[in-house]
Image: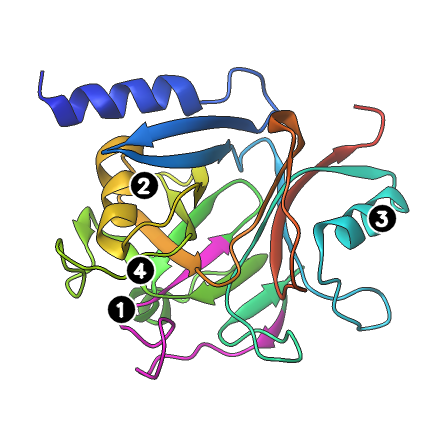
């Protein structure tokens, strides 16, 4: 068995949820870099995106999402920032919440990481979630209940983004999401030390075994994982992705 296959198998054993409805988070190390990875099973878990409250004001924080969910009889059990946004916290790219499109797809190259093509879209349906490269998304036009666009792609059909350099010196705390081909496994990851794009993408491909993965942010990378006693704080966020359960659970 190759080292890559062994690492992938160990990662899957650690990260595959053992109990339906549970988000499974683990701290992992790969090539001397440390990561926190949370696996979600969209087939059984309530995975959704959150941006504004009932008055159209940005939620902006995990705490505010938790408060709004409590009012609905639900409890936030996992969350992460979910894509780049403008100063008013509106999404830079494609954004859909509860089937309602709030921002169109942005297909063209541009400044910053978002415009480092190819970028991609996290598309969440009722029983699956997939990271899809933007041009493939426009060609297939999937019907997403929730969607957020970000960039660059980290892994594209099993290959690292062509612009990533193994000897890069640009290191930041970064977060992203990778999905299995069948859409039954979504893994949300934040680096616990500064990493390059190349190192971050390798982790998704070689350890998590996700054929497609998407960078979410670097300047704003935060996670809410109470099972690990982790509640990151900082400046106000735009889109937030999270999992909720009934308050009684």
Please identify the quadrant where the N terminus is shown: top left
Q: In this picture, which residue range is highlighted in magenta? A: 101-123
* For marks 3 and 4 on the same chain, the one whose residue lies earlier in the sequence: 3
Q: CA distance from mark 2 to mark 1?
A: 18 Å
* For marks 2 and 1 on the same chain, the one whose residue lies earlier in the sequence: 1
Foreground of the two, 143 or 25 = 25
- Residue shown at the point (61%, 25%) measured from the top left: 22
Q: Quadrant of residue 184?
A: top left
Is residue 146 in the magenta section? no
Residues at circles 4 and 1 in contact by the CB criterion of under 8 Å: yes
Foreground of the two, 76 or 47 = 76
Please identify the quadrant where the C terminus is shown: top right
Would you say 169 lies left or right of 192 here? Answer: left
* For marks 2 and 4 on the same chain, the one whose residue lies earlier in the sequence: 4
Q: Residue 81, which numbered label?
A: none
Would you say 52 lies left or right of 230 here? Answer: right
Is residue 119 in the magenta section? yes
Judged by depth in the image, the label closer to the viewer, 2 or 4, is 4
**On screen, residue 64 above or below 118:** above
Judged by depth in the image, the label closer to the viewer, 2 or 1, is 1
Residues at circles 1 and 3 in contact by the CB criterion of under 8 Å: no
Q: Quadrant of residue 106?
A: bottom left
Secondary-structure class at tag 3: helix
**On screen, residue 130 above or below 187:** below
Q: Residue 67, which numbered label?
A: 3
Would you say 82 lies left or right of 66 here? Answer: left
Task: Identify the residue under disc 4.
Answer: 153
- How many C-alpha atoms fall within 10 Å of the one at disc 3: few (<14), some, or many (≥20)? some
Q: Position of residue 245 (x, y in %)?
A: 73, 33
Secondary-structure class at tag 4: strand
Q: Quadrant of residue 208?
A: top left
């Amino acid at each position: 068995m190759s080292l890559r296959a062994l690492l992938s198998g160990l990662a899957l054993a650690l990260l595959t949820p053992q109990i339906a409805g549970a988000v499974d988070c683990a701290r992992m190390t790969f090539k001397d870099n440390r990561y926190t990875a949370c696996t979600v099973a969209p087939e059984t878990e309530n995975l959704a995106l959150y941006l504004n409250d009932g008055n159209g004001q940005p939620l902006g924080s995990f705490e505010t999402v938790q408060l709004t969910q409590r009012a609905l009889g639900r409890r936030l059990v996992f969350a992460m920032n979910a894509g780049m946004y403008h100063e008013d916290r509106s999404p830079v790219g494609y954004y859909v919440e509860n089937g309602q499109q709030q921002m169109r797809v942005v297909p063209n190259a541009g400044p910053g990481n978002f415009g480092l093509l190819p970028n991609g879209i996290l598309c969440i349906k009722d029983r699956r979630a997939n990271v899809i490269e933007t041009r493939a998304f426009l060609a297939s036009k999937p019907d997403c209940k929730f969607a957020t666009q970000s960039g660059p792609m980290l892994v594209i059909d099993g290959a690292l983004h062509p612009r990533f350099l193994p000897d890069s010196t640009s290191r930041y705390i970064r977060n992203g999401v990778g999905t299995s081909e069948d859409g039954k496994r979504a893994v949300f990851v934040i680096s616990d030390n500064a990493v390059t794009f190349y190192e971050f993408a390798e982790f998704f491909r070689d350890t998590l075994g996700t054929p497609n993965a998407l960078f979410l942010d670097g300047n704003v990378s935060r996670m809410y994982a109470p099972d690990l006693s982790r509640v990151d704080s900082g400046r106000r966020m735009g889109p937030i992705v999270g999992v909720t359960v009934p308050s009684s659970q």
